[in-house]
Each structure stands twice: as structure tokens, then as C-alpha cells.
Amino acid sequence: MSNPYLDETGQYRPLEMSDAALASPAFAAARRSWAATNAGDRDAWIAGWSPEGTIEDPVGPSMFDAEGIGHTGTTRLLEFWEKAVATPDHIEFRFDRGIAAGDELLCVGTMRTHMGSSIMEIDIAVDYRVDADGRLVSLRAFWEQDVAMASGLRPLTDDDRAAIAGAAGKGQ
């Protein structure tokens, strides 16, 4: 089964996006972030960030950020990578819509986090903002930690495995 959230190059993209959104610098930055995440390439991921960038994932207090103030600056962004990005085996971005405005892109859909033979799927909206150089200055992810934890992990299906293999086989 092919993954409809992957384009012809194997890169994630929202299903519905205007031509303006596809051409936006925020979309380009988000794609670089998604590719680096799934390649496990911490250096490429951090290179996509402004040194003063802030990530709030999720927004507010969470297991990744007890104070709810976000991770600001290269050192804290790398701490977030170790806590949230490096831990899962694979993260899928299944955004149904991408809406660009100015230097921002809002993506709405689901995120699927694979850990071992299990998967967790959460509803999510992510706002990406870039600077004049096209580097991320802000990522604000809205998802409900309590809902995600209550939904728990479910076993991977054959379709899940095929989607992962499709992404890995196309350079993800």
C-alpha cells in the first residue's frame, strides 16, 4: 500500500496545499525538518533552525518541558531532539492540510510515532515560522498529551509497516 502523504520523492507533504503554500519558505523549512527527523540526522535538523529558535511541542507544560516555556536556543533545541525526536524509531507526518500565510505554515492532521512494534497516533496542528533566511524560528505544536497517553500504543499493522518501508525506500 502506498502512503498518500508521501510525494514522488518520498518526502512528506500535506494532502491539500495551495500553490502559494507549496512555494512558501516555511513549507521548505518544514520539509527539511521532516526529512532530517526521519533520517535521524540531528545535524541537518539543527542546521534548519535559527540559533534563537524556539520549539514548543506540545505547547504548554509537558513531559518534554515541565515549565511549559519551550526550548529556545541551540542547546535547548538539541535537548528536545534527544528527548522527543531521537527516542521513537520513526515519526510520520500525516497532515491533511497545509496553510501558508506570510512567513508561517500551519499543518493540521495526525502524527504517528512508531516505537518498536507499536504506534501512537495523535491529532495535531503545527505552526512553523521562519526567518528571512528560511530557517525555523518557531515551531508550536498543538496536541493533547493526556489524550495521546490515554489512547496508548497499538500494534503496528501491515499497512503501517508498508508506509514505513515506502518512506525509507524513497530517502526518508
Image (spheres, rainbow, N blue to C red):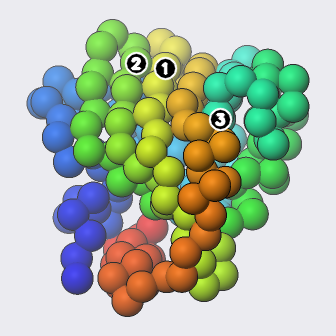
Q: Secondary structure at mark 1?
A: strand
Secondary structure found at label 3? loop
Pointer 3 residue: 57
User: In the image, which is nearer the foreground, mark 1 or mark 3?
Assistant: 3
Q: Quadrant of residue 7?
A: bottom left
Q: Mark 1 to mark 2: distance in Å?
A: 4 Å
Q: Quadrant of the N terminus?
A: bottom left
In the image, what residue occupies the spot 87% across and 23% down?
67
Percent position of residue 99, x then y: 27, 25
Residue type, mark 3 in image: Asp
Task: Report, in whole angstroms, how far the alpha carbon at label 2 lies from the one at label 3.
Answer: 16 Å
Q: Is residue 83 left or right of residue 128?
A: right
Q: Nearer the viewer, residue 121 or 25?
A: 121
Residue drawn at 87 percent across, 31 percent down: 66
**At 73% from the left edge and 60% from the top edge, which residue is drawn?**
86
Tell me the quarter of the image containing the C terminus. Answer: bottom left
Foreground of the two, 119 or 52 = 119
Dot 1, how many residues are within 10 Å of its Cα: few (below 14), some (14-19), or many (20+)? Answer: many
Residue behind mark 1: 129
The image quadrant that residue 52 belongs to is top right
- What secondary structure is marked by label 2? strand
Q: Quadrant of residue 143?
A: top right
Alpha-carbon distance for marks 1 and 3?
A: 14 Å
Judged left or right of residue 155, residue 30 is left
Q: Position of residue 91 (x, y in %)?
A: 54, 61
Is the Cβ of the residue at disc 1 closer than 8 Å to that at disc 2? Answer: yes
Residue 34 position, x and y percent, is 49, 50
N-terminal label among 1 and 3: 3
**What residue is rendered at 54% in x and 82% in y?**
155
> Is residue 135 rendered to the left or right of residue 79?
left
CB atoms of marks 2 and 3 within 8 Å: no
